[in-house]
Image (tube, grey):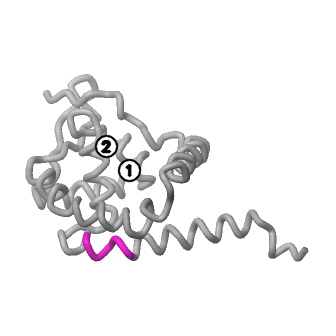
Amino acid sequence: MSPFDDPRLTAMGLLAEVMAGITDKMSPALAGAGLSDVDFETLIRLARSPEHGLRMSDLAAQTSLSTSGITRVVDRLERDNLVTRRACHSDRRASYAVLTDEGRQRLLGVLPRHLDDIETWFTGLLTPEQLADFLTTLRLIRDVVRPCATAGVTEPVKAE
């Protein structure tokens, strides 16, 4: 067997190809709603968090963006009135990004098409058992390689 035929290389290559392909298939719906992939990821993480908000540092950790990178994304989303910032009552240096009603409406507008795309290009290709096993496997790997991926999900947003 050639060292280039190693199944570990195949696994990584397939994972990269699948992610790139799915992203390409879903981008048109997001772009139609005026959102980039990063915008959508940021908004959906806020929407799925307690009180629709996360500490900026936790949001950066969840998205794998740098602190300055997430600041730029939140700045843009705030200009579009999709997100607002709130001061942290217990730490004046920290702030929260919080989904606005307009941000929620933007997500609700794109969500049906996005879910259709997910069903068409991803989850609908798997049996319920395959999907359950796949989700378990993804969480196992995610928890090792990105332990901060769920940072802040248990902390409630407290406005000053």
Residue 145 showing in the rendered view: no
The residue sitting at 19% across, 27% down in the picture is 158
- Residue 68 falls in image quadrant: bottom left
The N terminus lies in which quarter of the figure? bottom right
The residue sitting at 18% across, 46% down in the picture is 99
The residue sitting at 13% across, 27% down in the picture is 160
In the image, 131 versus 111, the foreground residue is 131
Q: Which three-letter amino acid code belongs to the residue tagged 2?
A: Met
Q: Tell me the element at label 1.
A: helix
Q: Which three-letter amino acid code belongs to the residue tagged 1?
A: Thr
**Would you say the residues marked 1 and 2 are in contact, meaning their CB atoms lie under 8 Å apart?**
yes
Predominant SS along the magenta part: helix
Q: Which is nearer the N-term, disc 1 or disc 2?
A: 2
Residue 89 showing in the rendered view: yes
The residue labelled by disc 2 is 56
Counting labels gives 2
80 vs 54: above or below: below
Rendered location of residue 136, percent (x, y): 55, 43
Q: Tell me the element at label 2.
A: helix
Rendered location of residue 2, percent (x, y): 88, 76
Q: Residues within 10 Å of mark 1 (few under 14, many from 20)?
A: some
Disc sitting over residue 44 in the figure: none
The residue sitting at 40% across, 76% down in the picture is 24
The residue labelled by disc 1 is 67
| Label 1, label 2: how far apart the Cα atoms are | 8 Å
The magenta stretch spans which residues? 25-29
